[in-house]
Amino acid sequence: MRVCFAVYKDGDYRIVRSLNGHTQRLHGNMPKEEFRQLSNLLEAADFRNLSGNGGGLVRQEAETFAAEIALDGRWHDDGYGTKWLEPESWRLQWLNADGETPFPSPVAKVIGWLKQFQPKNAKRFENTEFPDACPSSGIRLVQPSISENLRP
């Protein structure tokens, strides 16, 4: 199963769920209580203090979790009177590479919330309407380091 979920500060959301070759694309406005629950999970100190990712030998049962949370951004000035706000974001990627290493508790809570989320009064959409609902680049696997054992 693959789930992509994009939510905005006003509660608008887009969700894409894929299971067994069937893809469901829905958008709507999240009830305030559900939005508060998700916000609390994403703003929790134990979630925000996670860094890096869990790694290991990637097997067929691998699970991935990725989050990108928009921050306020930073103002830039080119020195000639042009100023612009550059958006910033906090990113987290976690890999349960062998299917046996559970996600950290804060990640598991967010995943649990996503599994239980039921879109109400949602409308279907086509991929071309909201192509940014799922990021095009998934988790990036890193090439292993190469070492050499030479005898003098």
Image: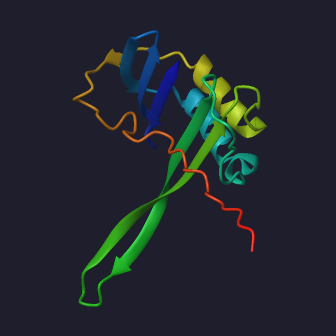
Q: Is the residue 148 above or below the residue 113 in the image?
A: below
Colouring scheme applied when the structure was drawn = rainbow
Task: Single out the residue that lies furthest toward the front.
Answer: 152
Is 112 left or right of 81, judged from the image as shown? Answer: right
Q: Residue at x 75, y 68 (%)?
A: 151
Please say whether residue 75 is visible from this viewpoint: yes
Place of residue 97 in the rendered image (x, y in percent of width and height, measured from the top left)? 66, 34
Depth check, front residue: 143 or 55: 143
Residue 80 quadrant? bottom left
Q: Is the residue 89 above or below the residue 7 in the image?
A: below
Q: Is the residue 137 above or below the residue 111 in the image?
A: below
Number of callouts? 0
Q: Quadrant of the C terminus?
A: bottom right
Place of residue 131 in the rendered image (x, y in percent of width and height, measured from the top left)? 29, 34
Place of residue 115 in the rendered image (x, y in percent of width and height, measured from the top left)? 60, 19
Is 142 left or right of 40, judged from the image as shown? Answer: left
Q: Is the residue 45 above or below the residue 65 in the image?
A: below
Please say whether residue 122 is visible from this viewpoint: no
Q: Residue at x 53, y 18 (%)?
A: 1
Depth check, front residue: 145 or 94: 145
Q: Residue at x 28, y 21 (%)?
A: 125
Place of residue 145 in the rendered image (x, y in percent of width and height, measured from the top left)? 61, 57
